Amino acid sequence: MFISSELFIQVLAAFLFMMGTLIVIQRRNTIMVLMGIELMLNAANLSMIGFSHYLSLVDGQMQVFFTITIAAAESAVGLSILINLFRNFGSPKTGEASILRG
């Protein structure tokens, strides 16, 4: 049984996205939630690269470049929020930050 590389890339991207979603849903540690979000972004990037290669277009690859740039900024902001949460509550768990609700 032969599986094409395009299909393999899409199945791998779907698996990575599913794993990232499960991490975000199940974990209460803020660091793990941020890692799950990054995993989902990387899965979406992998899928765009796979479709871009399959269709012989450069548009998807350019879009992935911008997505990676935005993901780097997002992780910097998320890390700064995490540091402030740890500083104020002494724990990286997301349940501890429920006091911040208005």
Image (tube, rainbow, N blue to C red):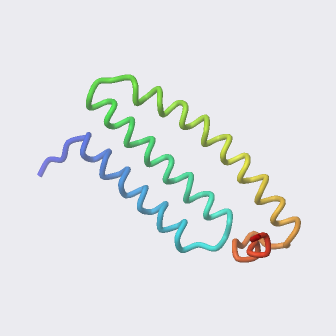
Q: Quadrant of the C terminus?
A: bottom right
Relative to 15, residue 46 above or below: above
| 88 with respect to 101 (left or right) | right
Q: Residue at x 45, y 41 (%)?
A: 45
| 63 with respect to 87 (left or right) | left
Q: Residue at x 61, y 38 (%)?
A: 70
Q: Residue at x 11, y 52 (%)?
A: 1
- Residue 38 horizontal/vertical position (percent): 56, 51
| Direction left: furthest residue | 1
- Residue 31 horizontal/vertical position (percent): 67, 62
- Residue 95 horizontal/vertical position (percent): 70, 76
| Direction front: furthest residue | 102
Choose top left, top right, bottom left or bottom right for residue 33.
bottom right
| 25 with respect to 87 (left or right) | left
Choose top left, top right, bottom left or bottom right for residue 91.
bottom right
Q: Residue at x 72, y 46 (%)?
A: 76
Relative to 57, residue 101 above or below: below
